[in-house]
């Protein structure tokens, strides 16, 4: 095997991604090679292009998400592939989706600010669920009385919803164009791909028995978000560029930000 040949390297990268079952960054892929055998960066780039093209016409695709590259089943097959698992996929409540959407588009945002928009209290279990799934994290504390925690999304959130960065979140204007008229029965209407992914990419079209239909979509939240569009979608890029004041370390302790 000639590791400086893009086609050979593409097959090896495919083996790595199939074996790992999760996204792998370029840095991690580099580390898997001993220094003497490590291909040049340009060869890596060519190999990824070869691998991506080789997936054409196949049931899976090469996808770059926030944590790196992964091989995944194409979305078109999700309704059928989901039948492999006996347990019914999780359906997320409208309240959870609204809360998640507000965090994604307005981060960093406090629980109180979320409640101001939604007009109802945020259920503690919703925050707990998203924290346990590692979709959101505390990134600091608002410098107001009570110093409420500020929430932002994570790389795991981007990975789960098939996004490379916050830039790939659909613009509100685009969403409004895709849904120009109110729909009486949301389950009979086509749902924009990104919104459906936020509900769950593997759900298919089935509806849980007895579940209120309003619980299957946060389409109406667009109206509320639209009224606050100025300043929406701050691209924190997982806060890599700059941590807000009063950031939090991994143990959850507040740490002051040092300015130079």
Image: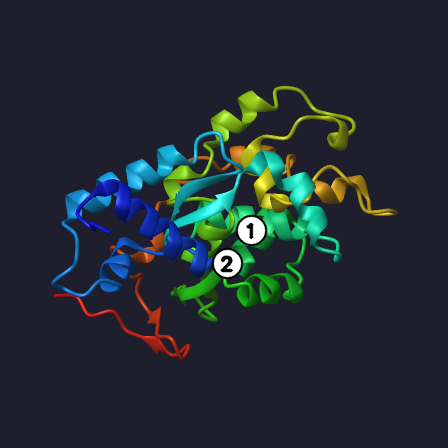
Q: Nearer the viewer, residue 200 or 246?
A: 200
Instruction: Compare residues 137 and 259 and report the one nearer the observer.
Output: 137
Q: Nearer the viewer, mark 1 or mark 2?
A: 2
Q: Is residue 40 above or below residue 80?
A: below
Q: Residue furthest right?
A: 210
Residue at image point 66% right, 58% down: 121
Q: Which percent across, then down, holds residue 81?
A: 65, 44
Q: Residue 135 got which mark?
A: 2
**Residue 114 placed where, x, y %?**
56, 53
Q: Which residue is nearer to you in this view: 33 or 2?
A: 2
In-image side of 34 versus 105 (left or right) = left
Residue 198 percent coordinates (x, y): 58, 44
Q: Which residue does the image show at 23% across and 58% down from the upper left? A: 30
What residue is rendered at 18% in x and 44% in y? Answer: 43
Q: Check disc 2 and report its element: helix, strand or loop.
A: loop
Residue 216: name its quadrant: top right
In this rendering, does residue 130 appear at all? Answer: yes
Circle 1 SS class: helix
The answer to whether mark 1 and mark 2 are in CB contact below 8 A is yes
Q: How is the image coloured?
A: rainbow
- Quadrant of the rendering where the C terminus is positioned: bottom left
Q: Which residue is mark 1?
A: 100
Q: Residue at x 43, y 60 (%)?
A: 20
- Residue 165 lies, in percent from the top left, at 37, 45
Q: CA distance from mark 1 to mark 2?
A: 9 Å
Asked whether residue 153 is in view, the answer is: no
Pick whichever of labels 1 and 2 is earlier in the sequence. 1
């Amino acid at each position: 095997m000639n590791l400086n040949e893009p086609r050979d390297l593409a097959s090896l990268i495919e083996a790595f991604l199939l074996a790992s079952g999760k996204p792998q960054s370029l840095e991690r892929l580099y580390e898997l090679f001993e220094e003497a055998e490590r291909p040049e960066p340009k060869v890596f780039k060519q190999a990824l292009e070869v691998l991506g093209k080789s997936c054409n016409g196949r049931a899976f695709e090469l996808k770059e998400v926030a944590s790196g590259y992964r091989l995944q089943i194409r979305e078109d097959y999700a309704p059928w592939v989901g039948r492999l698992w006996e347990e019914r996929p999780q359906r997320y409540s409208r309240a959870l989706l609204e809360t998640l959407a507000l965090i994604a588009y307005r981060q960093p945002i406090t629980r109180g600010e979320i409640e101001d928009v939604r007009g109802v209290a945020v259920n503690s279990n919703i925050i707990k669920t998203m924290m346990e799934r590692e979709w959101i994290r505390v990134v600091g504390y608002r410098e107001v009385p009570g110093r409420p925690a500020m929430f932002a999304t994570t790389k795991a959130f981007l990975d789960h919803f098939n996004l490379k960065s916050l830039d790939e979140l659909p613009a509100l204007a685009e969403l409004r164009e895709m849904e120009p008229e109110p729909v009486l029965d949301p389950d009979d209407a086509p749902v924009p791909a990104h919104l459906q992914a936020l509900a769950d990419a593997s759900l298919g079209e089935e509806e849980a028995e007895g579940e209120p239909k309003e619980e299957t979509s946060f389409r109406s939240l667009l109206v509320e978000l639209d009224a606050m569009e100025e300043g929406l979608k701050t691209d924190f890029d997982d806060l890599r560029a700059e941590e807000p004041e009063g950031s939090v370390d991994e143990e959850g302790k507040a740490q002051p930000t040092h300015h130079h």
